[in-house]
Amino acid sequence: MELGHVSGKISKRGISMTRLDKKMMDKNLDLIFEVEKYVLEHPDFARKIPRNAIVSIRIDGDEPFNRWSQRLAEKHANGKKNRPVFLVKINKMKPAASRIKQLRVERAA
């Protein structure tokens, strides 16, 4: 999925951001969650990243997101000496799927 430019500003908790920034931030949060699940399943992966590191996520084939993520990492790294920046490169993702095994629908009223 490639995100195109969307104009306009959104105010979130007093922070002004573009709609594109909000989409990128939402995508980044989703990816952080996916990386954390991956780390739970592959604990050796996490040992490669120091505790104080700034982590920047990249996705194969999504250059707009990758540029946004790089700018964010650089912004956080500025002025924070001794905090290395590590890239987590996602080469391929499985389709999103529900973890629900079974459910039931009932009429409420």
Image (cartoon, rainbow, N blue to C red):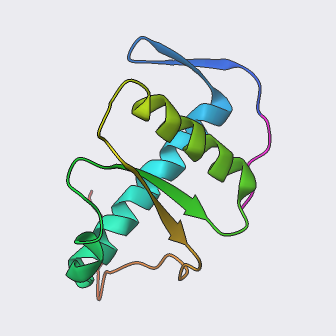
Q: 71 above or below 46?
A: above
The overriding secondary structure of the stretch rendered in magenta is loop
Q: Is residue 103 visible?
A: yes
Which residue occupies the foreground of this view, 103 or 43? 43
- Could you say where residue 25 lies in the image, as x and y percent from the top left? 51, 41
Hey, which residue is sitting farthest front in the picture?
82
Is 62 placed left or right of 86 in the picture? Answer: right
Q: Position of residue 88 (x, y in %)?
A: 46, 64
Q: Is residue 105 visible?
A: no
- The N terminus sits in image quarter: bottom right
Looking at the picture, tell me which residue is in the foreground, 92 or 102: 92
Quadrant housing residue 83: top left
Q: Quadrant for residue 21, please give it.
A: top right
From what the image shows, is residue 27 above or below residue 43? above
Q: Residue at x 79, y 44 (%)?
A: 4
**In which quarter of the view is residue 81 placed?**
top left
Q: Quadrant of the C terminus?
A: bottom left
In the image, is 102 to the left or to the right of 97? Answer: left
Residue 43: image location, x then y, percent: 21, 79
Vertical relation: 53 (above or below) 19: below
Q: Magenta part of the protein: which range?
A: 1-5
Query: Residue 2 lies in magenta, yes or no?
Result: yes
How many numbered callouts?
0
Residue found at the very far top of the displayed protein: 14
Q: In the rendering, at what x and y percent does residue 108 appear?
A: 26, 59
43 relative position to 33: left or right: left
Residue at the image point whose x is 65% and y is 50% from the top: 65
Residue drawn 29% across and 39% down? 82
Residue at the image point whose x is 73% and y is 67% from the top = 61
Q: Is residue 44 magenta?
A: no
Left-right relation of 107 to 65: left
